[in-house]
Image (cartoon, rainbow, N blue to C red):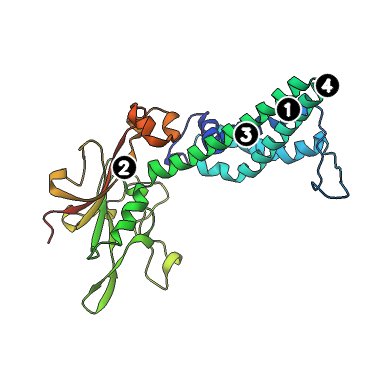
């Protein structure tokens, strides 16, 4: 797995905060909270005539959380890390965060129950925390859409072209190709063909994805020239002369690699795309309305474009 890259030890902690906000980190320390505070969680249907009160023991909560916690630290110890490895832990981490918040709140509530002002402050703090958590979650979710929506919008626009292209080339942005379902069909003689996605050589020196075999083989057949060592295969590349259209990221007009210069291409449709290198870490992970972050130079965007080759035969 290390062939596909390694990440530092704190990679999952940062991603946990970005994807689950503070509940993700609280879920990690939930076992410590359970150990320190008395546990008395009531489970029952609110408003029912018969209220069932079930007290969950510390051992039961530990049993729920221990497997996920162990899995998290095992994955953290591995050099190769991917954000998707955490998804199976999210439900239990949310449960752990909810349990920890309830346990701490109920214990503090019992502590200040006879002091009306402190009890009111405690309840306000809980409401403020929940409101901030919800707002940060919404901000993060919208930032993911707004900052990285360009590839989907570009390929959706391809379907709106008056004439479906024969080929679309991608170079350094190959890994953001969303799906072949975005590629339109066109008539060639008496047959119907699908627009081809072609790779141009870039700084990436690993193995590129290849199309599935024709029906009925499909996924049952391994494409030619594949390997299990992530070695670059020169058969995967096409020549720029085969490119009718291309999709690429315009970093301030800079383009290096197989596409040549921007002067060879006409911009058909562009969408702003986050320039991570020129944007502030963490801040770029959240969205504020009215372009506040961009106005103060905290985030930068560049054009992600559908390009048409000026000289194509």
Q: In the rendered structure, are the residues bearing label 1 and label 3 in contact, judged by CB atoms less than 8 Å apart?
A: no
**Residue 208 in sight:** no
Residue 81 position in % (x across, y down): 50, 38
Of the numbered discs in the image, which one, if any, rests on residue 231?
none
Q: Nearer the viewer, mark 4 or mark 2?
A: 4
Compute the Cα span from label 2 to label 1.
44 Å
**1 or 3: tag closer to the N-terminus:** 1
122 vs 40, nearest the viewer: 122
Crowding at label 4, few (<14), some or many (≥20) Cα neighbours within 10 Å? Answer: few
Q: Which of marks 4 and 1 is nearer the N terminus?
A: 1
Question: Distance from label 4 to label 1 (Cα)?
Answer: 24 Å
Q: Residue at horizontal 35%, vertical 60%?
A: 182
Q: Is mark 1 on a helix, strand or loop?
A: helix
Q: Do the residues labelled 4 and 2 touch (CB within 8 Å)?
A: no
Q: Residue at x 37, y 55 (%)?
A: 226
Residue annotated with mark 1: 33
The Cα atoms of the two marked residues, 4 and 2, are separated by 56 Å
Query: Neighbour class for label 3 at 10 Å: few (<14), some, many (≥20)?
Result: few
Q: Would you name the residue on which mark 2 appears? A: 272
Q: What element carries label 4?
A: loop
Residue at the spot of label 4: 114
Q: Measured along the vertical axis of the image, is residue 120 above or below residue 46?
A: above
Residue at the front extreme? 116
* Mark count: 4
């Amino acid at each position: 797995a290390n062939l596909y890259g390694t990440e530092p030890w704190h990679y999952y902690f940062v991603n946990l905060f970005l994807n689950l906000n503070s509940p993700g980190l609280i879920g990690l320390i939930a076992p410590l909270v359970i150990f320190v505070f008395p546990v008395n969680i009531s489970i029952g249907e609110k408003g029912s005539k018969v209220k069932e009160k079930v007290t969950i023991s510390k051992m039961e909560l530990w049993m729920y959380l221990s497997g996920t916690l162990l899995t998290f630290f095992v994955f953290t110890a591995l050099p190769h890390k991917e954000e998707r490895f955490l998804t199976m832990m999210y439900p239990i981490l949310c449960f752990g965060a909810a349990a920890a918040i309830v346990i701490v709140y109920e214990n503090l509530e019992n502590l200040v129950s006879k002091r009306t002002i402190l009890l009111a402050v405690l309840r306000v703090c809980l409401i403020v925390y929940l409101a901030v958590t919800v707002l940060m979650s919404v901000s993060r979710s919208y930032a993911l859409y707004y900052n990285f929506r360009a590839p989907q919008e570009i390929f959706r626009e391809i379907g709106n072209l008056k004439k479906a292209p024969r080929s679309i080339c991608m170079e350094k942005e190959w890994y953001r190709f969303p799906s072949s379902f975005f590629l339109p069909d066109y008539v060639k003689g008496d047959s119907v063909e699908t627009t081809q996605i072609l790779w141009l050589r870039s700084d990436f020196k690993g193995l590129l994805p290849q199309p599935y075999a024709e029906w009925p083989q499909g996924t049952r057949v391994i494409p030619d020239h594949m390997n299990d060592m992530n070695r670059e295969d020169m058969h995967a590349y096409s020549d720029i002369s085969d490119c009718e259209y291309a999709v690429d990221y315009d970093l301030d007009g800079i383009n290096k690699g197989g596409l040549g210069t921007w002067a060879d291409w006409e911009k058909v449709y562009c969408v702003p795309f986050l320039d991570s290198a020129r944007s502030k870490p963490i801040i770029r992970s959240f969205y504020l309305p009215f372009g506040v972050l961009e106005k103060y130079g905290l985030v930068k965007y560049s054009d992600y474009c559908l390009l048409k080759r000026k000289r194509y035969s």
